[in-house]
């Protein structure tokens, strides 16, 4: 039996009303999921405040409440714990409740604007190929060795993280690779976890709807490395101007990777084609099916992390050459009509620029590069004109369309994008609100040897409009349209 006092270790407590010797069934921060003898943690969210649901949680059976502000009216027989930070309290309580599962495996967190999903997913692949039991906590999916679970957030809530880490313990998992988003770090979801290492990929314009300034966004990422223990490693991309910033105050062992600067792990691109990359990594040549300079950085991060986690260098090179691309990350095929279709998750200016520059570095310039791109609703509006400017400058034709408009008017989002197009590029652009129609139009415009890039949604199999999610798979839709054209 678990008692409340058992799961409050490391929680910063301001006041206690009632007994901490009360029995605990489970922890919840959603009042609708509360059952008899549960602990309800009142979290201040971006949309709702859990403090408004304390009474409902008690009605549903909560025997104790953890909150930042005590209710005006306290009920007899209920234990109230006033804490400094409910998110942080939840993280420590979850780790305590699930018996600190992160301590029983080697957990590596990957943070940065772009590349988190690719790096974590490829590390999962690599260590599986090396014969280990492996876990994955990513945007695309959660893996407990061979068992797949659906992912709903880039960095899940603290309860979900610890629940799956405990499942990994039960399955004998030795390594786990986890995306650490800025939201997740800021909301203390990574606290209470023991990391064996941290990887920084890059930092560019994103999430300024949530973080007030770029400096704040950077510092949240940096705080992840600040909290790493002495026996962990911190591996950072120092070609990014913020790479060394991440390492400034960390206690972890510091390591670097780069294509352009001297670093512990460095690479040179020897060949870059649609079939893959030929790299020279620390004096050894390596062929990979992954494409583009941005993937050269991802490969370096994977190589460095694998070596720091104890794998032998030649084995790492062999395993990397066998890795398959991640769903929705530069995922491409060539139709019978010789039209190349590429689906990529690029939803930030920097990611879109990287993908388009990679395509332009490979193509002959005798073919058209048709880009279909949109921007998400209820998210950072300042990146919309920047993404449109990049798409129109680096493509021969561009179709602006809907991404996940969410609660916003998709036409208004597209107008925000259009404002970024420079005069000389106006004639290249076309706006089609319906994303499926936009993809169909791109396919109809394309001729043999042309390239179509569908950017922004990648692996997602839905489109979110006015609070509803509809089935929508970029890769399937562009595949189907190109097959229809062959008939």
Image (tube, grey):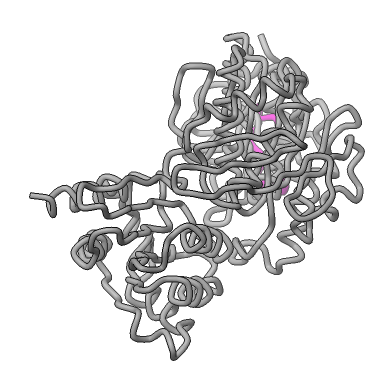
Quadrant for residue 11, please give it. Answer: top right
Residue 54 lies left or right of residue 438; in this view the side is right
Residue 88 is a magenta residue: no
**Magenta part of the chain:** 68-79
Residue drawn at (69%, 36%) of the image: 109
Q: Is residue 41 left or right of residue 263?
A: left
Q: Is residue 414 left or right of residue 24?
A: left
Q: Quadrant of the N terminus?
A: top right
- Residue 32, position as x, y percentages in the image: 46, 36
Q: As rendered, which of 217 and 459 lies closer to the eye?
A: 459
Q: Position of residue 14 (x, y in %)?
A: 84, 41
Compared with 341, 427 (above or below) is below
Residue 206 is drawn in which quadrant? bottom right
Q: Is residue 326 left or right of residue 85?
A: left
Residue 13 appears in the rendering: no
Q: Residue at x 48, y 57 (%)?
A: 362
Residue 52 x, y percent position in the rendering: 56, 50
Q: Kindly identify the residue that appears in the image at 56 percent across and 74 percent down.
A: 382
Residue 119 image position (x, y, % from top left): 61, 38
Instruction: Name the residue: 90% across, 51% down.
Output: 248
166, 433: nearer the viewer: 433
Give whichever of 162, 424 is nearer the camera: 424
Q: Nearer the viewer, residue 375 or 485?
A: 485
Secondary structure predominantly adopted by residues drawn in magenta: loop
Q: Residue furthest bottom?
A: 423
Residue 311 shows in this picture: yes
Q: Is residue 449 above or below residue 1?
A: below
User: Could you say which quadrant of the image residue 204 lies in?
Assistant: bottom right
């Amino acid at each position: 039996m678990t008692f409340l006092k058992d799961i409050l270790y490391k929680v910063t407590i301001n006041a206690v009303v009632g007994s901490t010797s009360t029995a605990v069934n489970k922890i919840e921060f959603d009042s609708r999921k509360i059952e008899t003898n549960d602990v309800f943690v009142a979290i201040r969210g971006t949309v709702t405040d859990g403090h408004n649901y304390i009474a409902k949680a008690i009605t549903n059976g909560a025997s104790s409440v953890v909150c930042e502000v005590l209710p005006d009216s306290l009920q007899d027989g209920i234990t109230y714990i006033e804490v400094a930070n409910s998110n942080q309290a939840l993280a420590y309580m979850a780790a305590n409740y699930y018996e600190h599962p992160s301590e029983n495996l080697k957990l590596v967190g990957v943070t940065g604007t772009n590349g988190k999903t690719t790096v974590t997913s490829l590390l999962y692949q690599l260590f599986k190929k090396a014969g280990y039991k492996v876990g994955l906590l990513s945007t695309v999916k959660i893996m407990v060795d061979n068992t797949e679970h659906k992912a709903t957030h880039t960095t899940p809530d603290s309860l979900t993280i610890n629940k799956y880490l405990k499942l990994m313990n039960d399955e004998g998992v030795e390594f786990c690779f986890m995306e650490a988003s800025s939201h997740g770090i800021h909301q203390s979801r990574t606290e209470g976890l023991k990391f064996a290492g941290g990887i920084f990929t890059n930092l560019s314009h994103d999430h300024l709807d949530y973080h007030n300034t770029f400096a704040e966004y950077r510092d949240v990422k940096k705080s992840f490395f600040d909290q790493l223990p002495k026996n962990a490693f911190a591996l950072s991309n120092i070609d990014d101007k913020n790479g060394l910033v991440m390492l400034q105050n960390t206690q972890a062992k510091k390591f670097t990777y780069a294509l352009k600067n001297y670093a512990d792990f460095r690479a040179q691109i020897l060949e870059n084609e649609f079939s893959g990359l030929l790299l020279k990594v620390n004096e050894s040549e390596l062929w990979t099916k992954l494409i583009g300079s941005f993937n050269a950085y991802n490969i370096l991060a994977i190589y460095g992390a694998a070596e720091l986690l104890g794998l032998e260098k030649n084995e790492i090179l062999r395993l990397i050459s066998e890795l398959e691309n991640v769903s929705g990350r530069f995922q491409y095929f060539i139709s019978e009509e010789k039209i190349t279709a590429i689906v990529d998750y690029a939803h930030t200016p920097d990611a879109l620029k990287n993908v388009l520059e990679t395509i332009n570095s490979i193509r002959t310039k005798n073919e058209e590069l048709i880009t279909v791109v949109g921007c998400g609703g209820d998210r950072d509006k300042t990146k919309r004109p920047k993404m449109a400017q990049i798409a129109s400058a680096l493509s021969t034709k561009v179709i602006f369309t809907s991404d996940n408009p969410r609660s916003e008017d998709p036409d208004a989002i597209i107008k925000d994008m259009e404002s970024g197009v420079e005069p000389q590029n106006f004639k290249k652009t076309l706006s089609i609100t319906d994303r499926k129609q936009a993809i169909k139009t791109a396919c109809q415009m394309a001729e043999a040897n042309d390239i179509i890039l569908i950017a922004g949604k990648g692996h997602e199999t839905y489109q979110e409009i006015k609070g509803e999610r509809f089935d929508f798979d970029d890769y399937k839709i562009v595949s189907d349209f190109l097959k229809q054209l062959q008939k």
